[in-house]
């Protein structure tokens, strides 16, 4: 599937978000690293390609919305919004500070670009459905994106929302389930095993796609497919690793965890190297694309030349055919 922004370019954005999120948390010695890291690629696809917004006008009525129901992943969203230009990067220093604009969980009244206050798990889906229905009533083509966690799916309100979205055919809302397989108290299969979450959504009439949640190209394809699916709500189940790309990846108790200065410095170093690698890969892709376009242009020009009718030269004048000479003979 051809896209305006390539998967490699989105990989650059993802690693940039991951790096800034780590730098944001670096001075605290603890934080919600796990759930923040597992949605980085999804945020990169949304804010790097698909989500319509205007950083200079966060309240633009025709914008798309994001409801980050798993509000504890706020640091990743804050990093994304700062990179997008909603506020200066220096404002990230206000994270978790009393009176600051970046609370631990998202607050729409404090942070430019945050569309819904969240953190009470299970409630985000209800808010997102209400926003989507409101956009429909206003005849707006805005899309509401919703991110919930798999542990969050233990909440009964989630399934009430799933039923409602199906009943009201809310097809202007796209839901992501961050299936990172861990929650606050342990692994989801041990706390409340929900089995195949995608099958459960499908049983309620949703259009379901399951993708590698760290593959920007797969996520992008799934979002475009969901946008083109009408008459039913869509869910994209993201197969992810909690803490992906850092020392927190998959380790027990990584919902809100402590870390040492050395761990964080090493993580920043590793992610910085990955970011540089991603930039090099994206640059190589751009050069390759440019060369291919130039070659195609040259081939098209050559084809046009070959297709042009050949000019037929007039017959050469000879003594026998020259009319003037003929007249002279008369």
Image: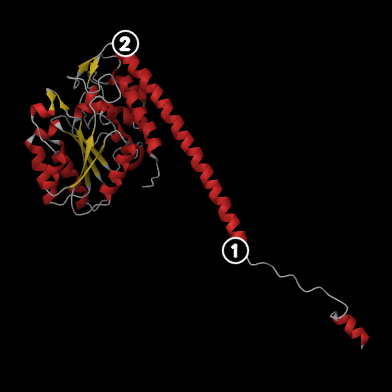
Residue 242 in sight in this render:
yes
Quadrant placement of the C terminus: bottom right
Query: Image check: 237 left or right of 89?
Result: left
> Residue at the location (52% across, 42% down)?
290
Left or right, residue 12 beside residue 264 = right
The secondary element bearing badge 2 is classed as helix
Query: Residue 307: which disc?
Result: 1
Density class for disc 1 (Cα within 10 Å; few <14, some 14-19, many ≥20) is: few
Q: Mark 1 or mark 2: which is in front?
A: 1
Q: Which residue is mark 2?
A: 262
Q: Is residue 214 above or below residue 236?
A: above
Do the numbered discs 1 and 2 sit on residues whose CB atoms are within 8 Å? Answer: no
**Residue at 25% across, 47% down:** 226
Quick one: 292 or 79, which is closer to the camera? 292
Distance (Cα) linking label 1 and label 2: 67 Å
Q: Write the residue at 34% across / 31% down.
A: 14
Q: Position of residue 216 (x, y in %)?
A: 33, 37
Q: Quadrant of residue 316?
A: bottom right
Q: Is residue 293 left or right of residue 46?
A: right
- x then y, percent, for residue 321: 84, 80
């Amino acid at each position: 599937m051809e896209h305006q922004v390539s998967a490699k370019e989105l990989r650059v954005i993802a690693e940039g978000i991951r790096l800034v999120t780590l730098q944001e948390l670096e001075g605290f010695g603890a934080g919600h690293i796990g759930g923040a890291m597992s949605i980085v690629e999804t945020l990169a696809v949304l804010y790097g390609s698909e989500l319509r917004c205007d950083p200079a006008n966060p309240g633009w009525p025709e914008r798309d919305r994001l409801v980050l129901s798993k509000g504890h992943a706020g640091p990743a969203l804050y990093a994304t919004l700062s990179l997008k230009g909603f506020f200066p990067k220096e404002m990230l220093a206000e994270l978790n500070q009393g009176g600051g604009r970046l609370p631990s969980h998202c607050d729409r009244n404090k942070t430019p670009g945050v569309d819904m206050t969240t953190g009470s798990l299970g409630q985000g889906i209800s808010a997102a459905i209400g926003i989507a229905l409101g956009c429909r009533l206003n005849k707006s083509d805005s899309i509401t994106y919703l991110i919930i966690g798999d542990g969050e799916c233990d909440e009964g309100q989630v399934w009430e929302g799933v039923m409602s979205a199906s009943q009201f055919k809310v097809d202007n809302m796209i839901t992501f389930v961050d299936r990172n397989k861990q929650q606050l108290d342990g692994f989801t299969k041990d706390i409340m095993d929900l089995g195949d979450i995608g099958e459960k959504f499908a049983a309620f009439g949703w259009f379901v796609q399951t993708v590698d949640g760290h593959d920007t190209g797969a996520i992008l394809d799934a979002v475009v497919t969901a946008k083109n699916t009408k008459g039913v709500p869509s869910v994209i189940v993201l197969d992810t690793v909690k803490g992906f790309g850092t020392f927190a990846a998959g380790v027990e108790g990584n919902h809100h965890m402590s870390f040492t200065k050395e761990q964080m410095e090493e993580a920043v170093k590793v992610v910085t190297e990955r970011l540089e690698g991603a930039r090099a890969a994206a640059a190589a892709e751009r050069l390759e694309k440019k060369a291919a376009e130039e070659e195609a242009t040259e081939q098209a020009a050559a084809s046009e030349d070959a297709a042009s009718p050949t000019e037929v030269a007039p017959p050469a004048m000879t003594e026998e055919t020259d009319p003037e000479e003929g007249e002279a003979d008369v």
